[in-house]
Image (spheres, rainbow, N blue to C red):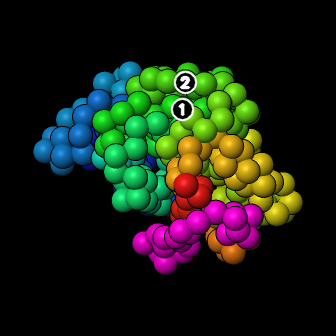
Amino acid sequence: MTLRTAALEGAELLSKSGTPEPRLTAELLLCHALHCERTYLFAHPEQELREVEWIHYGRWLHERMQGKPLQYITRTQEFYGRPFRVSPDVLIPRPETELLIETVLKRRPAAQSVIDVGTGSGAIAVSLSHELRTTAFAVDISLPALRIAASNGAASLIASDLLSAIASESMDVVVSNPPYIPLTDLDTLQREVRDWEPHTALFAGATGLDVYRRLIPDAWRVLKPGGLLALELGFGQAGAVAALAANWQNMEIANDLAGIERVLSCEKPA
């Protein structure tokens, strides 16, 4: 089978299964099987697939048709210009989460002690480490997640339930993309999210606010006077989370590219 035929037949299978972007997905899976860039497919359409490449491609097509996210199949996702390893043990980093990085860089460009709570793949911690030229601590309650974070270059790993293992007044910045989806929204999620991404990193009680209620006061304890707290928000949660942080100062809420209130940042009084 040629590369052109493989891409076309793969796209047809994915389309019939209702998979979004079937042609692009088929090409990316084929590239993953061949260990090549997409341009190679267009430059060598008549090249024949080797048996091992066809076996891998066929298996990955089947997995994607069952709803497994493309990123879990290829085991990689780009975030803030860098590739990160991912697995079903961690959330797939989303582009809107990059606004957390931009917020911290804008408000604390010289921060030296930074901690990422619920680090997952380590994408936030590693990105801030590079951009701030310091070491960002990566915290997670999940040991498998911390192993993924370590493989992505996160250097200072801490197994902890939120900030319970962190000393008081020790950090310049606390940043987090916490679980914030209400349990009542479970059946409304895409199957790629509902059936494959880790529920402990997605859901936070009936209203989606359970983790914020614990994290915000503990961040107050951990931050130095004048320290910054930056949190990703779920859709429609800005008002409720702002109320939980009513005693903080200089609160700002930043919208993502879709116009959704996505990041809340505020300061512990100096």
Residue 218 or 128: which is nearer the viewer?
Answer: 218
Q: Does residue 222 lie above or below 55 as drawn?
A: below
The residue that disc 1 covers is: 138
Q: Residue at the bottom extreme?
A: 259
- Judged left or right of residue 7, residue 142 is right
Amino acid beneath label 1: Ala
> How many numbered marks does the figure carry?
2
Q: Identify the residue shown where x is 64% and y is 63%.
A: 248
Q: Identify the residue shown where x is 53% and y is 68%.
A: 250
The kind of secondary structure element at disc 1 is strand
Residue 30 or 235: which is nearer the viewer?
Answer: 235
Residue 179 placement (x, y as % from top left): 69, 50
What number is the disc on residue 2?
Answer: none
Residue 164 or 93: which is nearer the viewer?
Answer: 164
Residue 137 or 147: which is nearer the viewer?
Answer: 137
Residue 26 placement (x, y as % from top left): 40, 48
Spatial CA distance of label 2 from label 1 is: 5 Å
Quarter holding residue 99:
bottom left
Q: Identify the residue shown where x is 18% and y is 41%.
A: 40
Q: Does residue 129 lie above or below 253 as drawn?
A: above
Amino acid beneath label 2: Leu
The kind of secondary structure element at disc 2 is strand
Residue 239 placement (x, y as % from top left): 69, 75
For the C terminus, the quadrant is: bottom right
The residue that disc 2 covers is: 157
For the N terminus, the quadrant is: top left
Q: Residue at the left extreme?
A: 43
Residues drawn in magenta: 242-262
Q: Does residue 60 lie above or below 66 as drawn?
A: above
